[in-house]
Amino acid sequence: AYNFNAGPAALPLEVLQQAQEEFVDFRGIGMSIMEISHRSKEYEQVNDESQSLVKELLGVPDGYQVLFLQGGASTQFAMIPMNFLKPGTAAGYVLTGSWADKAAKEAKGFGEIYVAASGEASGFRAIPAPGDIEVRPDAAYVHITSNETIAGSQYAAYPDTGSVPLIGDLSSDIMCRPIDVSKFDFIYAGAQKNLGPSGVTVVIARDELLQASPKHVPTMLRYDTHAKSKSLYNTPPVYSVYIVNLVLKWIKSHGGLEAMERMNRDKTKLIYDAIDGSGGFYRGLVEPGSRSIMNITFALGSEELEKRFIQESEKQGFVGLKGHRDVGHLRASTYNAVPYESCKALADFMNDFRQRNG
Ligand code: PLP
């Protein structure tokens, strides 16, 4: 299948094959990794090694810790304000689409927020310029969504928030390109797009933010609980972390994040070129400067034509090209594990479909 699913999404074939090989006998121990204690030396090694690989691949500076949590990125929408939005402060949210909106709505239940910038007036066709983001000097933090999975937009450059902590939801673009982690104080990402299966959420945060959660916060929703126990406070999502471990090794063996970015740019260029060169037959939903290299959103002239596009593409082995139910139209998700050949096949299909229907 040419898998363009938005998430859970394609995993590297080599990773799935290695997992299959190790499924019933994890590296010679005679059992599956799912059948052993999370306190065993075998699992601790997977946990430690995965945290180190996240640091190594992203170039995380000293003074940050990597956590593996549960509950998906959606739980972070609540944990962040529960831990950081203290009474008397307000947090800035940059509204770039559905996911930023969800994060902001959740935070409202825990304290005061303000809209630091919004792309709503333009139908979320563009990411606000860094200079247009209001950073109040007394803000608890500013929250951004690095890549809007549904709208198909992505920050080309991150804002500088000075001494105000910058928090980023990188769920749908973590490890798609090198980033300067030091610009952020806190990053989170559900694993199920670029890092592995659902079930584990990666957090990368400055040590200071992980020291002392407010007293009223329940144990499992406190960052200090997980930071103190190296993410082994309770039973972790062992199998998900194990697959993340294999994906991180796959990224490393394929040249790291510079190589991922190069591949993602080459892949997405094929599809964006098919849109831009179509004389208006395909219409991109995002302005060129804010286009995502992970989720490409586009429309055809009518709903009927879009339906035909989906039906024909499915017959030819393309999966997941229907747009999200909130915005409709079409979407191709081109995460790290989606091969160049799949994108080439899609671009060819798009050109052929245009010739037949244009
Ligand atoms: N943030 C972004 C940018 C997403 O794309 C998603 C899911 O697609 C989420 C948050 C929610 O993630 P989860 O399903 O892990 O709660």
Image (cartoon, helix red, strand yellow):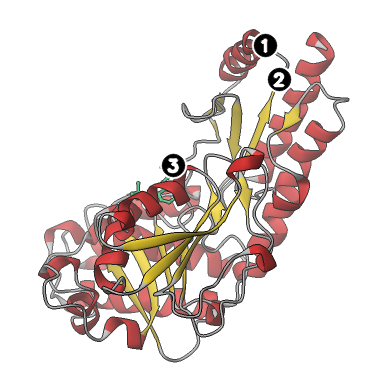
The x, y position of residue 348, in whole percent, is 77, 28
Discs 1, 2 touching: Cβ within 8 Å: yes
Residue 7, numbered label:
3
Is the residue 312 above or below the residue 322 in the image? above
Residue sitting at 48 percent across and 43 percent down? Answer: 10
Q: Is mark 3 within 8 Å of ligand 1?
A: yes
Amino acid bearing label 3: Gly
Crowding near pointer 3: few (<14 within 10 Å), some, many (20+)?
Answer: some
Q: Position of residue 136 (x, y in %)?
A: 51, 74
Identify the image quadrant of the C terminus. top right
Mark positioned earlier in the residue sequence (3 or 2): 3
What's the residue type where badge 2 is placed?
Leu
Extreme residue in the bottom direction: 62
Foreground of the two, 5 or 137:
137
Question: Image check: 289 left or right of 188?
Answer: right
Left or right of residue 142, residue 134 in this image: right
For the residues labelled 3 and 2, the Cα–Cα distance comes to 23 Å
Amino acid, disc 1: Leu
Relative horizontal placement of residue 89, taking residue 164 as reference (left or right):
left
Disc 1: CA contacts within 10 A as few (<14), some (14-19) or many (>=20): few
The number of numbered badges drawn on the structure is 3
Secondary structure state at the residue bearing disc 1: helix
**Inter-mark Cα distance, 1 to 2:** 6 Å
Residue at 54% over, 70% down = 252
Q: Secondary structure at mark 3?
A: loop
Label 2 sits on residue: 300
